[in-house]
Amino acid sequence: MLRIRLKRVGKKGHPSYRIVVADSRAPRDGAYVEWIGNYDPMMDPPAITYKEDRAIAWLKNGAQPSDAVRRILVRDGVFDRVNPE
């Protein structure tokens, strides 16, 4: 199963994350299928950029977002457009 999740990059004490589509069995910082965005929690407010069209395409193809990525997508309204529940 594919998951949309965060991959940690950056220095010790200053984390930054990539929003990636990866196999659910792959390690957190392991191989991924596609890099669709960035998340920097150290900025005020946290900086989030991602390819909205690619996120929607992966969600429609069955990729499951992690809890953190789901909160990002819900905040921007992307998750509700794909799953109107």
Image (cartoon, helix red, strand yellow):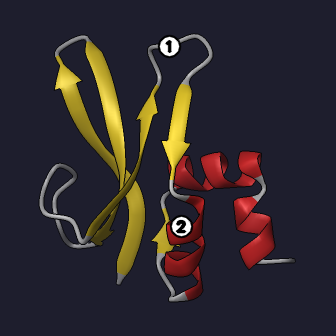
75 and 36: which is toward the camera: 36
**In this picture, residue 31 sits left or right of residue 54:** left
Q: Residue at x 40, y 56 (%)?
A: 5
| Image disc number at residue 43 | 1
Find numbered disc 1 in the image and state the secondary structure of the residue it sits on.
loop
The N terminus is located in which quarter?
bottom left
Disc 1 crowd rating (10 Å Cα; few below 14, some 14-19, many 20+) is few
**In this picture, residue 38 sits left or right of residue 84:** left
The single residue placed furthest to the left in the displayed view is 30
The C terminus is located in which quarter?
bottom right
Q: Residue at x 60, y 56 (%)?
A: 70
Q: Quadrant of residue 23?
A: bottom left
Image x and y of residue 72, in percent: 62, 46
> Where 36 falls versus 16 (above or below)?
below
- Amino acid carrying mark 1 in the image: Met
Image x and y of residue 50, in percent: 50, 50
The single residue placed furthest to the right in the displayed view is 85
**In this picture, residue 27 sits left or right of residue 3:** left
Disc 2 crowd rating (10 Å Cα; few below 14, some 14-19, many 20+) is many
> Where 17 falls versus 33 (above or below)?
above
Q: Of label 2 and label 1, which has the lower sequence position?
A: 1
Q: Give me the C-alpha separation between circle 2 and circle 1.
A: 23 Å
**Dot 2 corresponds to which residue?**
55
Q: Residue at x 17, y 49 (%)?
A: 29
> Where 59 falls versus 71 (above or below)?
below
